[in-house]
Image (cartoon, rainbow, N blue to C red):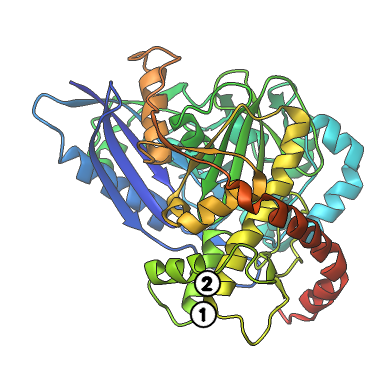
Amino acid sequence: MDLLLGIDIGTGSTKGVLVDLSGAVIASETIAHAMSLPRPGWAEADAENLWWREVCQISAALMAQLPSGGSVAGMGVSGVGPCLVLCDDQLQPLRPAILYGIDTRATAEIHSLTAEFGEDNLLERAGTLLSSQAVGPKIEWVRRHEPEVFDRATGWYGSNSYIAAKLTGEYVIDHHTASQCDPLYATRRFDWNHDWARRICAHLPLPRLVWPSDVVGTVTAEAAAATGVPAGTPVVAGTIDAYSEAFSVGVRQPGDQMLMYGSTMFLVQVIDEYFSDPTLWTTTGVERGSLALAAGTSTAGSLIGWLQATTGGASFDELTAEAAAVPPGSEGLLMLPYLAGERTPVFDPRARGVVVGLTLRHGRGHLFRAAYEGISFGIRQILERFDDAHSAARTVAVGGGLRSPVWAQAISDITGRPQLVPEQAIGASYGDALLAAIGTGLVDPDTDWARMAREIEPDPRNGALYDDLYGTWLELYPATRSQVHRLAAADPD
């Protein structure tokens, strides 16, 4: 029996699955972990001793659960991103991996590179403006602030391409991840911006471009000894976890859209022609030659977790019940959920959280509902921009945040959009397994394992209230921007 192994390195855990060719999950394993926050604005992970170690542990655990007569016919890995892992010629990381847009250290480099290349050129050639999500400014930051690391580096990787290199020895990057390495990649042409890449990467060679389902190599003897996966097993490139998860739930046709409820909110919409918007990310899709729009907030589940810890550490179920007892609108309480700056659509690493309307009668439940609603207003702001490119045909919701019915309902009520929820919300590792099945030719390229279980409909009783509050919410960021920027500048770190 042919089985596929999919592994995803997430922000808060690494998960692996064994899947058969029908899409049935045979076994799964998860290891929780935490990112490192060594300084304000920094978010890092240990690529060797965390990511690779957990891939080895999960692979070995899943191989021990192979059913009689079963064998792994292919493997795929996804991961958080876009990230930056700089390695020497022995594939040893020279510093901790710099994570995606929640790491805001490269603000000065964003400004200097934008001034050097020009906003119009960036939009035309890269498809988006530079932000904390972009990898180019992070490479520039290392070059300026850690020149000894930059000079020793012989290659740069994302999370999934680093694991692919550890498994196969191949130096590759998938087109989708590359398309988020602004300004190094030309999304319109599916190729590198070679002049800008030479300027930023200097002596570092560019990885070979591949598509997520391409077989990039086979498991080496050394990797087989570390993981338990047989030497010679085909490995597909994989991609960034949010896109692999979107692929896993059938978000593949123009107009298909995914909302991922996680530590942050991430949104993906497949489009049928190139579209550039300075408040969004224009990227390639998962399938060969496809395009997509993406957007992401800097907080979501991480904000809820912070509130939970800060307000006494009550159980999630208890806090959800308290938030559900508060009427829509949180009785006049509004929140800007920018506790880690904000990515799309404001692209402001110096943005800060703001709570407006707080009174003595408000309690913990009000704060939690206001947080859910603040996140949801931000999603509406993003979706309105998506509509300029391609009206959504359907919206599929995934992620751990769906455990909160308050949050899920608030998103539908505030955006006015129904959300489809899959029967199996397994995550990006499931998409990795499907990519491996397609890449090895074991299933047809149009194979879709997703089945929808239910739909979250907007409650028409709340539409007018939320429309009114949304207008007020939109005014909060411009009204408080200068004040929070002064406060951010006063931070000694």
Measured along the vertical axis of the image, is residue 233 above or below residue 409? above
Residue 185, quarter of the rendered image: top right
Measured along the vertical axis of the image, is residue 35 above or below residue 221? below
Which quarter of the rendering shows the N terminus? Answer: top left
Badge 1 amino acid:
Thr
Q: How far is disc 2 from disc 1 in space, using C-alphas?
A: 6 Å
Q: Secondary structure at mark 2?
A: helix
Q: Residue furthest front?
A: 461
Badge 2 amino acid:
Trp
**Picture residue at 53% right of the left edge, 41% below the top:** 457
Q: Nearer the viewer, residue 29 or 93?
A: 29
Which residue position holds label 2? 306
Measured along the vertical axis of the image, is residue 41 above or below residue 273? below
Q: Residue 5: image x %, image y %?
A: 30, 33
Residue density around tag 1, few if under 14, some if 14–19, many if 20 or more, within 10 Å: few
Q: Residue 461: image x %, image y %?
A: 62, 51
Which residue position holds label 1? 310
Residue 481, quarter of the rendered image: bottom right
Report if the CB atoms under discs 2 and 1 are less than 8 Å apart: yes
Q: Residue 15: image x %, image y %?
A: 35, 47
Residue density around tag 2, few if under 14, some if 14–19, many if 20 or more, within 10 Å: few
Q: Nearer the viewer, residue 218 or 267?
A: 267
Q: Nearer the viewer, residue 30 or 328?
A: 328
Q: Secondary structure at mark 1?
A: helix
Is 311 on the left-hand or right-hand side of 436? right
Q: Is residue 219 visible?
A: yes
Q: Residue furthest bottom?
A: 360
**Picture residue at 27% right of the left edge, 30% below the top:** 19
**Picture residue at 74% right of the left edge, 33% below the top:** 387
Q: Residue 480: image x %, image y %?
A: 83, 70
Measured along the vertical axis of the image, is residue 388 above or below residue 199? above
